[in-house]
Amino acid sequence: MTDYLIKNGFVFDPVQGINGDKVDVAIKDGKIVDAGDVTNPTIIDATGMTVMAAAVDIHAHVAGPKVNMGRNFRPEDKLFNCTAGSGMKRMEGGFSVPTVLRTAYLYARMGFGFSMEAAMPPLYARHTHEEIRDTPIIDQGALPVFGNNWFVLEYLKENEIENTAAYIAWLLNQTKGFGVKCVNPGGTESWGWGLNCETVDDVVPYFDVTPRQIVSGLIEANEYLGLPHCMHVHGNSLGEPGNYGITLDTLKIAEGVKPQNDFGREVVLHNTHLQFHCYGGESYASKSFESKSKEVVNYINSVDNISYDLGVVTLDETTTMTADGPFEHHLSHMNNLKWANTDVELETGSGIVPFIYNPKTFIAGAQWAIGLECGLFIKDPMRAYITTDAPNAGPLCRYPRVYKWLMSAKARDDMLDNTLKYGDKIRERCYIGELDREISLYELAMMTRAGPAKTLGLSHMFGSLKPGLEGDVAVYPYNPETDTDDPEKIEYAFGNAAYLIKGGKLIVKEGEIVDMGNKRTFWVNAKVNENPMVERDISEKFRRYYTVTQNNYTVEGPHFVPNPYVIEVDATK
Amino acid sequence: MAKVILTPNQTPTLFLEAENITPDVFAGKDAAEIAALHGFVGKTTVTLGDYFTIEGAGGQTAADTTVVINGDVSRVKYIGMKMSAGELIVNGNADMYVGGWMTGGKITVNGDIEAFAGLGMTGGELIVNGNAGNYLGAAYRGDWRGMQGGEIRVSGNAGSDVGTFMRGGTIVVGGNIDVHVGTHMEGGTIIVKGDAKTRVGGQMVKGTIYVYGDIDVMMPGFQYRNDSDLEVDGDKGRFALYEGDMGERHPKKKGEVIYGQLYMKY
Ligand SMILES: [Zn+2]
């Protein structure tokens, strides 16, 4: 394997406290090593450029049945939006729901090394893994959804943490999943009865359990197992005016819970796409709707065991897709566009609706502002990660634009003054006007690399340039000394990495993708003590309810996971 | 006004995809440059010069460019796609997507055209002195944005699914029309001067459809309202107004419920 030495770049690595110093970065046998430990390396001249560890995406919807349904029912998303193959690259297409190849190439061009698929319906884990397999270059994992799963609802009604944990361990193994995702806890199942869970204390019909019990129980089970990642929640009443109270209620469930794991993870709850959960007021009208990002982030600032990602609205035409079936139904009745829905037997649901965040409307502008506020109010950027909940709040390709807005008050003012029709109203109803903070490159490295890697329990592999970590390095054509004059340079540079080295392989060379890498699928194998009751419950559910047998459920073998990276966890003690 | 004349010199074995044949692309180019513009046949890239003899040159802008195709282009797709200004005249038959997504200017086809003409168009004029195919002025598959502005005039007959997801503009069909007219229509006007078959205005929310001749089978979601004397596209007559589709959602404007309107001439 070729050794690399990246010379003369401005290096940003918060884990090692390197803040723009000119440090050489060396890679040998696929790992970062001290600069003196490489012999005859290929030199990469990063003079005048920014060097960081490859980025880590903690939450995006880029593989699986709902992503593919999005592709199928939105042929117009690919219209005029395809690029013919050239060199190493095959044809790529799609804007908000790109093909697997475009997803991979986009991540590479943006300097990413790892992405977490944020919602895998267990029954369709096979499909999810086939898409992950077909997405080259980046390493990926997937979070199976648990928040409306019949086993979980039944166990947590009686607060049976050990049984819940045993079931989680079994399901992670069956689906080759990475951790515990919880979407609209109890709400999606309630919707089977035409209802929803709008607060954490609404009772799920038939199962007689509340979102509070589900969230609390999943956190406890997660820590009982000592999984690398924490419980990852999309709370109740997403997108509803006045939902911030429910968000605070959800976050407070984690109060006092200590992380238990061997991976250096310090949080026990990750609240995804916080932007959608920080709304005040009673309607979307400007006289009522208001931002509550400050209240929510202030609470998170006051504790040390919660992280979140932003879910910034990018003001694009996009495709929303979530396991929050009732929310998508609600959305389809707001914009009257097409709607797809699936009930995933015993486990979860899903809905898809195209959506246009129109900058000419007050509400889309306010959502844009709130997402950025969530990134600007954070005291410890190691606990706030930059996402667009791709493609829900905005397409994956917009990450660099979000960085620009976070890093430049001028770019935000330009939006408020020139692009948004109700800029002044938005300043009035949101906090964006009072925030002049500009995220630094050092903080950006925390919010896109070091932080997400730590909360995923992967800081021993990703997120830093410390010797021993994976040889994942991104070099951006951005000079932190001279390129500060124009915020557009931020957006350009972070969408057009000059170099990406992934696992020690040169993937992007002088802005061109030159290698498809050595893609791995990460999953977590949690060992638990034998649990005959859970084993019996599983075979019973398959016998009585599932339309498939267990043999057709398990994700196994090289067809689905040709290049696994297994993280072992022992919870038998 | 500068003129470019294209004369077909061979018929493609498959179909020629020629989205570059527009005043917008031809503007500022001489005959040789136009001949070098690309097109696709199957998976191969070809040039316009491979299929046409090209005379003349484009004007400075699209607005001062006229493109004339003299001959049969019934195996050429995307003529006039996305054009914004100027004029395009086809003296012969053309294949699919004539004037697709056009925003301005004028296209005249002295012959028949195939499906998907004027797809998603937002402005300009598309005149067909002949027959049109299916999905005239409709939306691209999957899209909800059909024709939004401009005018389409067909002197002969039109196929099925005309004006699907139409949101604005006017389509006038001089002859008869096939099934599915104005499905999911949310605005604009469709005038059919001949007969229609079935499923006129299905899932229509807004907009107006006039049918001068007969409708074989009316949609059950339409209700008779009243009769009135109207002048439509220069034709005077007495019309019966039906509103629908009652099975769809009904938006309100200034407190009044809005329906799609279907006028049938006595
Ligand atoms: Zn999500």
Image (cartoon, rainbow, N blue to C red):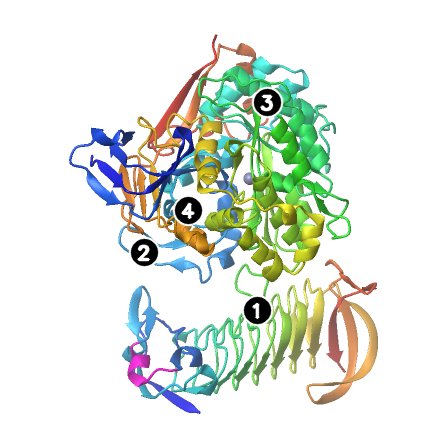
Q: CA distance from mark 4 to mark 2?
A: 14 Å
Could you tell me which quadrant the N terminus of chain A lies in?
top left
Please give the range of residues in magenta: B28-36
Image coordinates for residue A237, horizontal then vertical, percent:
69, 38
Q: CA distance from mark 1 to mark 2?
A: 31 Å
Amino acid type of the residue that numbered disc 3 sits on in the rendered structure: Leu
First-in-chain label (3 vs 2): 2
Q: Disc 4 on helix, strand or loop? A: helix
Ligand number 1: quarter of image: top right
Residue farthest along the bottom direction in this orientation: B1
Residue placed most toward the observer, A223 or A523: A223
Res. A218 mark: 3
Quadrant of residue A256 in the image? top right
First-in-chain label (4 vs 2): 2
Q: CA distance from mark 3 to mark 4?
A: 31 Å
Res. B240 mark: none
Of badges 1 and 2, nearer the viewer stands 2
Q: Disc 1 on helix, strand or loop? A: loop
Q: CA distance from mark 1 to mark 3?
A: 49 Å
For disc 4, the marked residue is: A103
For disc 1, the marked residue is: B138
Res. A85 mark: 2
Q: Chain of mark 1?
A: B
Q: Are marks 1 and 3 on the same chain?
A: no
Q: Disc 3 on helix, strand or loop? A: helix
Q: CA distance from mark 4 to mark 1?
A: 31 Å
Q: Are marks 3 and 2 on the same chain?
A: yes
User: Are there few (<14), some (14-19), or many (20+) residues within 10 Å of tag 2?
Assistant: few
Q: Are marks 3 and 2 in contact (CB under 8 Å)?
A: no
Q: Are marks 3 and 4 on the same chain?
A: yes
